[in-house]
């Protein structure tokens, strides 16, 4: 879970779909106002909670019947409607301003990712004692030299594959030391490794898969973090108690529900949006960057790969995956219902994966899964 940092919904401001100059002026005026409004919404701490507070992944998560309260279900319904509305707005923007859905320069994207990845592993090498992220501590003496080798491999596109393999080795070592469930917090590293391996390929078809894989891994990381906020709220309560201003006066339990949905909705839109995709990436990237002011050096280094990846995604823009999502011709009702339904399905899939994986490794989720059948009567409290 990404403990907290400001995060706002992935749903951009309302605009008119007309091609007229008046609508263009409206969009230009509305964007700054919408950005300001989003900044006032409750924000989740993007500083990963495991970096700053005690945690225990062997502990059973909250039973689903206690997570899916009436408040949770009402918030879920509200965000499903917001996601549905965002797809309708995205469709209007895509038709009115098609240039927003065009991809950027892949070479610039690759250069940024290689430079950022190299800088991150140089920082890990210099700091020492860390496998991939701040809480994954190790005393292995060989590991910093592997990190240094990964950084050096980023100097050339031909050698990036070695760096990608090195990242996979670190990920596997971390899973062996801390468990697969713990490392499931960080699928973004698998996406980075795949990107670097494919960068060294000569096949253009293989290289074209790089950005869809990176998008998927970053968004999966965010969605997994949202579920963690709901499954283990007790990990974050001490942080919120120490920084009460983060909740903007909202009760901590209600704040975590809202923060998780904001994070999940952002990730869902970044994975499936088109016309306003870059706006969503920019908003979330700013949130991660601003969190550094509050959480400091550890947060800056720990989230460097995420921030660099978002900057690269902003430069690149939509991928073939995004265009495929929007390829079909549907009416407004069909578009909205499909978006809301997919959002609901994604939350369900991540809940099952999170609780199922924790139970498979530690057995802690058994009671929660068994109580799933009783939700209709027990959840509305």
Image (spheres, rainbow, N blue to C red):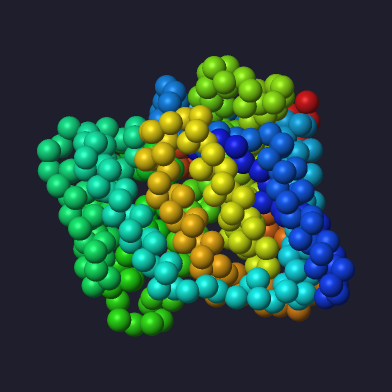
For the C terminus, the image quarter is top right
14 is higher (above) or lower (below) than 376: below
The one nearer the camera, 307 or 337, is 307
Res. 70 in view: yes
Where residue 277 appears, x then y in whole percent? 63, 62
How many marks do you count on the picture?
Answer: 0
Where residue 94 appears, x then y in whole percent? 72, 72
245 is higher (above) or lower (below) than 120: above
Asked whether, in this view, residue 171 is left or right of residue 109, the answer is left
Where residue 372 appears, x then y in whole percent? 64, 37
The one nearer the camera, 178 or 365, is 178
The one nearer the camera, 369 or 34, is 34
Q: Which residue is drawn at 41% across and 81% down?
A: 205
324 is higher (above) or lower (below) than 288: below
Q: Which residue is drawn at 65% across and 67% down?
A: 274
Image quadrant where residue 139 sits: top left
Q: Which residue is drawn at 19% across and 50% down?
A: 148
Image quadrant where residue 85 sits: bottom right
Asked whether, in this view, residue 300 is left or right of residue 79, the answer is left
Q: Residue at x 45, y 56 (%)?
A: 309
Asked whether, in this view, residue 227 is left or right of residue 17, the answer is left
Res. 374 in view: no
Where residue 364 appears, x then y in whole percent? 47, 30
Q: Which residue lies furthest to the left in this view?
A: 141
């Amino acid at each position: 879970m990404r403990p907290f940092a400001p995060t706002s919904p992935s749903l951009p401001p309302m605009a008119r779909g007309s091609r007229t100059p008046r609508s263009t002026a409206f969009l230009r005026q509305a964007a700054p106002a919408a950005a300001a409004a989003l900044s006032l919404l409750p924000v989740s701490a993007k500083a990963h909670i495991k970096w700053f507070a005690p945690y225990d992944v062997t502990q059973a998560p909250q039973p689903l019947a206690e997570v899916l309260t009436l408040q949770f279900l009402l918030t879920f319904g509200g965000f499903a409607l917001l996601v549905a509305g965002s797809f309708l707005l995205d469709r209007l923007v895509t038709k009115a301003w098609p240039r927003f859905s065009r991809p950027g320069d892949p070479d610039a994207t690759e250069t940024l990712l290689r430079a950022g990845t190299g800088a991150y592993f140089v920082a890990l090498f210099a700091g020492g004692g860390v496998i991939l992220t701040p809480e994954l501590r190790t005393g292995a003496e060989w590991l910093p030299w592997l990190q240094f080798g990964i950084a050096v491999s980023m100097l050339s596109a031909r050698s990036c594959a070695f760096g990608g393999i090195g990242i996979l080795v670190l990920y596997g070592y971390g899973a062996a030391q801390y468990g697969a469930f713990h490392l499931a917090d960080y699928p973004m590293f698998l996406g980075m490794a795949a990107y670097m391996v494919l960068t060294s390929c000569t096949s253009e078809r293989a290289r074209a898969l790089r950005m869809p894989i990176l998008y998927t891994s970053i968004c999966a990381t965010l969605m997994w973090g949202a579920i963690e906020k709901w499954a283990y709220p007790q990990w974050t309560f001490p942080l919120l108690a120490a920084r009460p201003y983060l909740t903007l006066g909202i009760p901590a339990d209600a704040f975590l529900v809202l923060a998780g949905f904001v994070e999940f909705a952002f990730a869902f839109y970044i994975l499936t949006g088109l016309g306003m995709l870059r706006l969503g990436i920019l908003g979330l990237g700013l949130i991660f960057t601003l969190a550094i002011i509050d959480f400091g050096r550890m947060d800056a280094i720990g989230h460097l790969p995420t921030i660099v990846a978002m900057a690269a995604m902003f430069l690149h823009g939509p991928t073939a995956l995004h265009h495929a999502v929007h390829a079909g011709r549907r009416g407004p009702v069909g578009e909205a219902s499909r978006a809301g339904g997919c959002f609901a399905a994604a939350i369900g899939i991540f809940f099952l994966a999170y609780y199922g994986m924790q139970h498979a490794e530690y057995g802690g989720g058994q009671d929660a899964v068994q109580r799933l059948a009783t939700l209709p009567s027990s959840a509305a409290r």
